[in-house]
Amino acid sequence: MSGTTSPEQIFEKVRGILVDVLSVEAGRVVPEARVILDLGAESIDLLDLRFRVEKAFDIHITKDDLAAAFGQTIETGEYLARFTVGALCGYVEQRLEQVHG
Amino acid sequence: MVEPAARVSVILGGTGSIGAAVARRLAGTGAALVLVYLQDRARAEAVAAELRGRTREVRLVEGNVADAVVHERIGRTVADLGGHCHNLVHSVGLTSFKPILRVRPNQWDLILEVSARSLLDAVSALAEPLAAAHGSVVAISSQGASRFIPGYGALGPAKAALESLVRQLACEMAPRAVRVNAVRAGLIESEVLQYFPTGMREAVVQRTPLGRLGTADDVAAVVEFLLGPAASWITGQVLEVDGGFSLT
């Protein structure tokens, strides 16, 4: 995976992964869709999603990275609202820049 | 590098309740420990710090045991420790707590890969170091392998596959003097209990002849036995460790 992956390419890959993992129609996977609240991801799906994103983009994602990116305030609902498809793509883009320059 | 004769134990799920309890027991034998964990680095570092005062070496390997890359890392670590693997413990399980009819295909695949196929991956990757040490393998199974547990998702079928795999591996590895067994553990006191249906803990205690849930060390003690020389003529077996629950 080179550092020149465009935001559009990242979105297409992430969308494909979400369609496979969550068995949702591609049309529902839009940037503003919330992965848990709108697309129905369960905790095991988030793990599956992480593994597949790591493979697809050749990056290593730690639990701490995710907590830092999306916040840990699950109780207040902040995390649920912030964890959108667009935010996930933005996170991948940021990690690719960090890793591959 | 350390001397080749040094005992090396690899524990998949080595920082979980049962895995860490096994590690504590094996630390007492002076074995070098390779603890494999999924993602909780802080917890893994805490377990390693506790054990480092009690044994000569503790190595941590992070990652998904369903990923071949992790097994390559484990193999390199074992090679660095002298190339022998005396003990391999598989204490890994993943599920989505819900009725089996609500388990989606990707969830089924991930649960089976992590909870069952990873034993095959580990034994394949460590076949030579295990044979070189005339090693022993123990997998942790659960009651769900042989009976219905409400809301257990796909973990019951995964554990059934794990037990079957133990028998296959036992026969195929026997000519190389490697033994493979399983412990079918009953419900133990651990953080995982919070995910089980309300009231299940009390119901299990009531049905258990010995009148209590198990502890991680209850299971670890049997794992230690199966790994050791006292079990040298036991292979391909699944030992119930459940306070008698399976009898009722």
Image (cartoon, coloured by chain):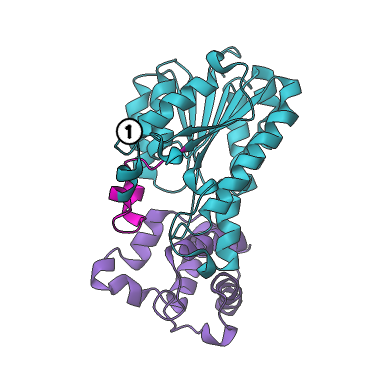
Chain colours: A purple, B cyan
**Crowdedness of circle 1 by 10 Å Cα count: few (<14), some, many (20+)?**
few
Vertical order, B36 against B10 (above or below): below
Instruction: Determine whether, in the image, residue A24 is placed left or right of residue B149.
Output: right
Which span is picked out in magenta? B185-202
Circle count: 1
Q: In the rendered image, which quarter is residue A5 located in?
A: bottom right
Could you say which is closer to the camera, residue B248 or residue B34? Answer: B248
Residue B228: percent from left, percent from top: 53, 17
Q: Is residue B4 magenta?
A: no
Side of B153 relative to A8 (left or right): left
Whether residue A3 can be seen here: no
Tell me the amino acid under the disc marked 1. Leu
Q: Nearer the viewer, residue B229 or A5?
A: B229
B161 or A15, which is in the foreground?
Answer: B161
Q: Please tell me whether residue A28 is drawn above or below residue B42 in the rendered image.
A: below
In the rendered image, which quarter is residue A56 located in? bottom right
Q: Position of residue B205 (x, y in %)?
A: 31, 43
Residue identifier under label 1: B210
Provide residue A87's location: percent of width, then percent of height. 43, 75
Q: Is residue B56 above or below residue B115?
A: above
Seen from this angle, which residue lies furthest bottom? Answer: A27
Dot 1: chain letter: B
Residue appearing at x 47%, y 83% in the figure:
A31
Looking at the rendering, in which quadrant would you find the C terminus of chain B?
Answer: top left
Give residue B81's quadrant in the image: top right
Q: Is residue A70 left or right of residue B12?
A: left
Q: Position of residue B126 (x, y in %)?
A: 66, 31
Q: Secondary structure at mark 1?
A: loop
Q: Residue at x 23, y 71 (%)?
A: A76
Residue B193 among those drawn in magenta: yes
Q: Which is nearer the eye, B61 or B142?
A: B142
**In this orientation, does residue B99 appear?**
yes
